Image: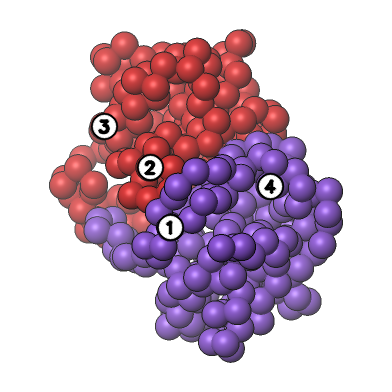
Chain colours: A red, B purple
């Protein structure tokens, strides 16, 4: 883990207060991931660290829709690998697809997520990719807030740039 | 307009069939913007063209949530400008904000959109930014499918990398 990068990620994005998480739980600390993903020097450096965690043989990248698309775009520019974006629901018009971009059946993909606390959202995205015939070779989290445990229990290979577990 | 880039954008993303657009209209041609935004050489080149269309004095970039976040990330890495992402609705948890990332009051921003047919979605995003105290100095479209007319009528300065108007 790159301690200096982790310190700067936290400084850029750690908010203190009373927050309701997507899981419904409350937390006194909230990582506003947009604050580091929209800061170009941090985004560039984080993308470079994520790229180092891609296993050999990775031929595509993927991310759930939302903030993680900022990160996956940067990793794509760093690695020249094509990208798939996984919607929560199939698109309501146009192509009506749930997996956007490039996700050919048989592709060996790495799924990239910004912050994962429960692992639930990224696991759903992984399952959508697998249903589309894609191999999810690894899940790479920018910040593991606990989600990696759940994802490893579900059988996924998980790496993280930073591990910052909730303290209470 | 860079004719060779426009030709490659179209080749990468133009689908033929019977499509329902977000406006409810039907079209025999559909630009699957994800197909060019997830292809790193095209994304890199498009971001460079968008960067050339930023007016002097631009100090932040913005994009509506969705596919355009891939493009705005690439433009941010190209220009080192910070980014704001405008949600369709305020976030349901965490910070509960509608504008994510960096959008300080008084900022001079350029709003970036991938493809605009009616201009409606990007206009709503511009209005959200203005309500937050931001100046929208210009709207830059990767592909203008007609939306620029509506946006100019509403008083916005609009530029586009490619103009591809619906033919029927």
**Quadrant of the drawing holding the N terminus of chain B:** bottom right
| Measured Cα–Cα span from mark 3 to mark 4 | 36 Å
**Of residues A21 and B1, the one drawn nearer to the viewer in this rendering:** B1
Place of residue A165 in the rendered image (x, y in percent of width and height, measured from the top left): 32, 33
Q: Residue A120: give its label.
A: 3
Q: Are marks 2 and 1 in contact (CB under 8 Å)?
A: no
- Quick check: A82 left or right of A111? right
Host chain of mark 3: A
Q: Residue at x 70, y 30 (%)?
A: A80
The image shows residue B160, relative to residue B38, as above or below, that is below
- Kindly state the secondary structure of the residue where label 2 is placed: loop
- Residue that badge 2 annotates: A96
- Residue that badge 4 annotates: B10
Q: Earlier in the sequence, mark 1 or mark 4?
A: 4
- Residue that badge 1 annotates: B26
Q: Nearer the viewer, mark 3 or mark 1?
A: 1
Host chain of mark 4: B
Query: Residues at marks 3 and 4, common chain?
Result: no
| Measured Cα–Cα span from mark 2 to mark 1 | 14 Å
Q: Residues within 10 Å of mark 2 (few under 14, many from 20)?
A: few
Q: Residues within 10 Å of mark 1 (few under 14, many from 20)?
A: some
């Amino acid at each position: 883990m790159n301690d200096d990068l982790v310190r700067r990620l936290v400084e850029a994005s750690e908010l203190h207060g009373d927050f309701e998480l997507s899981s419904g739980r409350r937390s006194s600390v909230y990582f506003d991931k947009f604050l580091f993903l929209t800061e170009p020097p941090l985004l560039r450096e984080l993308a470079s660290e994520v790229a180092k965690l891609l296993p050999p043989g990775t031929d595509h990248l993927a991310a759930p829709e939302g903030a993680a698309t900022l990160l996956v775009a940067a990793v794509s520019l760093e690695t020249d690998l094509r990208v798939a974006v996984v919607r929560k629901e199939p698109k309501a018009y146009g192509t009506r697809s749930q997996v956007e971009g490039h996700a050919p059946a048989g592709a060996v993909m790495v799924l990239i997520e910004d912050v994962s606390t429960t692992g639930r959202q990224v696991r759903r995205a992984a399952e959508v990719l697998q249903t589309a015939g894609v191999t999810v070779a690894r899940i790479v989290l920018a910040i593991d807030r606990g989600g990696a445990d759940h994802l490893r229990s579900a059988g996924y290979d998980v790496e993280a740039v930073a591990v910052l577990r909730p303290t209470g």
